Image (tube, rainbow, N blue to C red):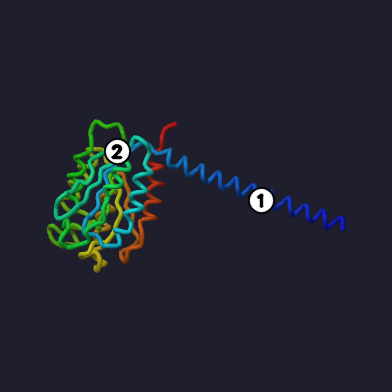
Amino acid sequence: MYYRKVFAWAVAFLVAFSAIGVASAKVTVNNDQQRGVQSIEPLNLAVLIQDDLISQVGNEIGVTKDFIRSLPQGSQVMVGYITTGTLQVRQPFTTDLEKAANSLRIPISSRGSSAFNPYVEVIEALRKFDSNGTNANALLLISDGLDTSRGFDSTAAGHTLDIERAISEANKRHVSIFSFYAPSVGLTSHSHLAASYGQSSLNRISNETGGRAFFQGTTGFVTFDSYFSRLRDTLNRQYARVR
């Protein structure tokens, strides 16, 4: 009987100790998450969305709003749409993150809103960054990345004149371009080759401006959740607050 009591006490102690350990771990994770948000320096961020992306992209507006709201205090955000060869600025740069988030709308998802070449509008957006600002500069391009303005040529994938100009403009203005791939209602929604060309272009413009491209393969579309998770990790490392 005595040994049974001792055994029971021992088990109870181990269970209690384990519970304390789990609680402690949860607190550590929560604290790490809070530090992760607070460790990013304020950013000047332009969010550009290609207007002819497939309709599923409209389901990701909520997580995109959440990302904007999660930016550190002092950040400035611009929201624009690339549509029919023009840049539609829905919200000029503002420190009101809630206002910027609420300026997002669902993409039109129509061939009539096709950009043909998103990089001309990227250049236009880059010129709206304040060259005298103290914040780090970043641009998030949500696009299929495909430039068909001068035809569909495999030799030009990732190396068109406007991509070269966009890279040059971004580096001159110290803007890192991050990109999310999503197919459009046009070629990239049904051609693996077109999708690979678009992703190659996004990968190049991001890599050569100090950013990063995110995509999930050339078929289908799931969610931006993993994109934003990896983007937050990248921003935490790249723009860590100096303590």
Q: Is residue 25 above or below residue 153?
A: above
Q: Position of residue 6 (x, y in %)?
A: 82, 53
Say what secondary structure mark 2 lies in.
Answer: strand
State the separation of the CA atoms marked 1 and 2.
Answer: 44 Å
Q: Amino acid at mark 2?
A: Gln
Among all residues in the image, which is located at the extreme right?
1
Q: Residue at x 41, y 42 (%)?
A: 237
Q: Are marks 1 and 2 in contact (CB under 8 Å)?
A: no
Sort mark 2 into few (<14), some (14-19) or many (20+) by Cα contacts within 10 Å: many
Say what secondary structure mark 1 lies in.
Answer: helix
Image quadrant for the C terminus?
top left
Residue bearing the label numbered 2? 76
In the figure, residue 45 lies in which quadrant? Answer: top left
Image quadrant for the N terminus?
bottom right
Q: Position of residue 234 (x, y in %)?
A: 39, 46
Q: Residue at x 66, y 51 (%)?
A: 18
Q: Amino acid at mark 1?
A: Ser
Among all residues in the image, which is located at the extreme bottom?
190
Q: Residue at x 42, y 41 (%)?
A: 37
Q: Earlier in the sequence, mark 1 or mark 2?
A: 1
User: Image check: 89 left or right of 102?
Assistant: left
User: Image check: 127 left or right of 216?
Assistant: left
Work out whether residue 76 or residue 151 is closer to the camera in this orientation and state it.
76
In the figure, residue 221 lies in which quadrant? Answer: bottom left
Residue 187 visible in rendering = yes
Q: Is residue 148 above or below residue 40?
A: below
Residue bearing the label numbered 1? 18
Residue 208 visible in rendering = no
Work out whether residue 169 or residue 241 is closer to the camera in this orientation and state it.
241
Q: Position of residue 79 (x, y in %)?
A: 25, 46
